[in-house]
Image (cartoon, rainbow, N blue to C red):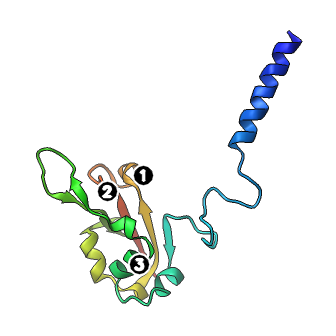
Amino acid sequence: MMTRLRVVGAVFACLLTACAVPAGTSQATPAGGGGQSRSVLTHAQLAATNSDNLFDAISKLHSDWLVTRGPTSVNDSSPSSVSVYMGNTNLGKADALREIMVIDVAEVKYWDAGQAAARFGMGHPRGVIEVTRK
């Protein structure tokens, strides 16, 4: 019985060690992220791109957010793009970002498809870019 407890304890310790984050690193922030998540862009980050509109700024910082992929269903052959929301209002697809000036934005957050479905409802297969105004 004592041997079984030692084995279970050793396995638990190994699993705990394997799941631990090494010292000096962070799960939520990338290297050089300044404490922000990879899914959030601050006004300072956007302004540093020297872009006038939000589309150009995001394309320089996170072009992967704007990637348009092939059709999402057999019935609809049009390619799908990320949706854009501001203040719980759907502004349209990625092209709507061209109309928003960087100077007017406090923060931009990217929600992947699963998070977007939970937050904004179904119908966002490429996720959502949520814009927060100053």
Image quadrant in which the N terminus is located: top right
Query: In the rendered image, which residue does mark 1 sit on?
Result: 115
Earlier in the chain: of badge 2 and badge 1, it is 1
Relative to 108, residue 116 above or below: above
What amino acid type is highlighted by mark number 2? Arg
Task: Tell me the element at label 3.
Answer: helix
Occupied quadrant, residue 108 = bottom left
Q: Residues within 10 Å of mark 2 (few under 14, many from 20)?
A: many
Occupied quadrant, residue 93 = bottom left
**Are discs 3 and 1 less than 8 Å apart at CB?**
no
Looking at this view, is 83 or 66 the one in front?
Answer: 66
Please name the residue shown 39% across and 48% down the image: 114
Relative to 58, residue 84 above or below: above
Task: Tell me the element at label 1.
Answer: helix
Q: Which mark is on residue 60?
A: 3
Residue 103 horizontal side relative to residue 122, left or right: right
What amino acid type is highlighted by mark number 3? Lys
- x and y percentages locating residue 119 in the rendered image: 40, 53
Task: Tell me the element at label 2.
Answer: loop
Q: Tell which residue pokes out farthest to the top in this image.
A: 1
What amino acid type is highlighted by mark number 1? Gln
Query: In the rendered image, which residue does mark 2 sit on?
Result: 126
Residue 82 horizontal side relative to residue 46, left or right: left
Q: CA distance from mark 2 to mark 3?
A: 19 Å
